[in-house]
Image (cartoon, rainbow, N blue to C red):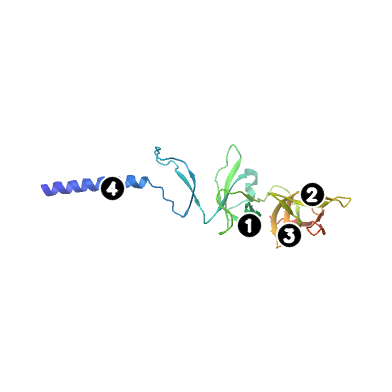
Amino acid sequence: TQVSSARSRITEAESGLRAINAKLRDTKAIAPFDGIIMQKMVEIGDTVQPGQPLIVYSYSKYLRIKVEVPARLMPGLSKGMVVPARLDVGNTQINARVAQIAPIADNKQHTVTVKFDLPEGVPGGAGMYAEVMIPDVNSPSRALPVIPKSAVNQRGSLPSVRVLDENNVPKMRLIRTGIEIGNNNIVVLSGLEPGERILTNGNEVKPSIPWDNPQ
């Protein structure tokens, strides 16, 4: 009958409309969060395949540090563990929490991808540099020197101190700093030994104090 024929055409039209809407949805890439586009992998007019990456988004509210950790250091890490970290922005010292550990290692680089969650509101943004301090449980523990922050001369990204030699002559020496202890002191990871004498900015002589790393 004409009614049955009309209903059949309506059903066919609705099916075609659903197919068109599905194709329209496939032309959009919608992130499930507010953020920014970090990388665009295709251009207008490109032919793409199902599952092909199109765009890399960054969730700007919560930041993470992605680190390729040498496999030999993995025994010192576990999910949920908190480790010291330093952001390149303002040389900011923070604590980072282990969020994800890749189940397999890179068989060429012998590294494991580890992602660390950062506290909300930290300075910086996606694509910036950060340094994470990972404990090496395989190496014998040693005392690290702690010095006043006022003794550190920051020139660019290379911190240094003035160390007194046996003739009490100050000599500039590059160091690598770690976490801050309290408001006035900082740990030296390399470049200085406990007991060596240094000059503060006020030219006061101070010995570096040993500090046993709890990790």
Provide the residue designation for mark 4.
18
178 relative to 169 in the view: left or right: left
Looking at the image, is mark 1 or mark 3 earlier in the sequence?
1
Provide the residue designation for mark 2.
172
What whole-number distance in Å separates the C-alpha atoms at marks 2 and 4? 73 Å
Provide the residue designation for mark 1.
94
Looking at the image, is mark 4 or mark 1 earlier in the sequence?
4
The image position of residue 26, as x and y in percent, is 36, 45
Q: Amino acid at mark 3?
A: Asn
Looking at the image, is mark 2 or mark 4 earlier in the sequence?
4
Q: Amino acid at mark 1?
A: Ile
Q: Quadrant of residue 212?
A: bottom right
Mark 1 residue crowding within 10 angstroms, few (<14) / some (14–19) / many (20+): some
User: Which residue is the extreme one toward the bottom?
Assistant: 183
What whole-number distance in Å separates the C-alpha atoms at marks 4 and 1? 51 Å
Contact flag, marks 2 and 3 (Cβ < 8 Å): no
